[in-house]
Image (cartoon, rainbow, N blue to C red):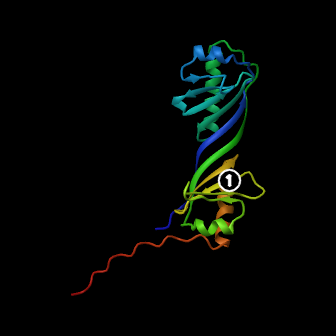
Amino acid sequence: MPRKVFTKTQNVVISADIYARLNLEFLVRKLDDISYDPETFPGAIFKIKKLNASFLLFDTGRVICTGTRSFKAAKEAITELTKRLRKLKISITKKPTMRVTNMVASGAVGGVLNLNRLVFKLDNTEYEPEQFPGLVYHMPKSHITYLLFSTGKIVITGARTEKEVKDALKILIKQLTKLKELKKEVPAKKAVKKKK
């Protein structure tokens, strides 16, 4: 049976400013699930497992949140983070500002793909099957990047809204159809009993 055409958001990356100076060494002493090694990276890594959220915390008050599957869930995670910081008597002077910097969605184009042909038909592609089974396609004049697999499964990165994810899928299907590279899977033939 042909696969359905769909996308599902797997990860939303949010950049936020929580308007607070953070003493990262102090936070390491006070919080669980936090790590900080200033010799290798200037930020602390903090996790809130129950919300499936991970944060990069910087002393400037800049925060990167990843792991959530929607802007709403990321917003809840940032709210929980600020609540925990306030409990530690950290002064947060304003309501945090947030913006989506990247969304990662998985999905399918509704058919199988011949990646060996596609690499020659699409510009801005990378395909080294000996190292990785997917073809990387950077959409021209866009921040969208696709990862295409021969099964028809795809990963879309670089989008900043759910609408952009859906539009990116439509554009890709239109391109594949125009190139005559979107093949519907052939259903397996049913065994026919021979008459005796």
Residue 191: percent from left, percent from top: 32, 77
Where does label 1 land, which residue?
A: 145
The correct choice, above or below, for 25 with respect to 190 in the image is above
Residue that appears at 63% across and 21% down: 83
Query: Is the C terminus in the top left, top right, bottom left or bottom right quadrant?
Result: bottom left
Q: Nearer the viewer, residue 172 or 164?
A: 172
Residue farthest along the right direction in this orientation: 141
Q: Nearer the viewer, residue 80 or 140?
A: 140
Residue farthest along the left direction in this orientation: 196
Residue farthest along the bottom direction in this orientation: 196
Residue 151: percent from left, percent from top: 52, 62
Residue type pointed to by label 1: Thr
Mark 1, Cα crowd under 10 Å, few <14 / some 14-19 / many 20+, is many
Query: Helix or strand or loop: what does disc 1 sit on?
Result: strand
Residue 188: percent from left, percent from top: 40, 72
Residue that appears at 31% across and 80% down: 192
Residue 53: percent from left, percent from top: 58, 32
The correct choice, above or below, for 153 with respect to 50 in the image is below
The correct choice, above or below, for 75 with respect to 9 in the image is above
Q: Quadrant of residue 118?
A: bottom right
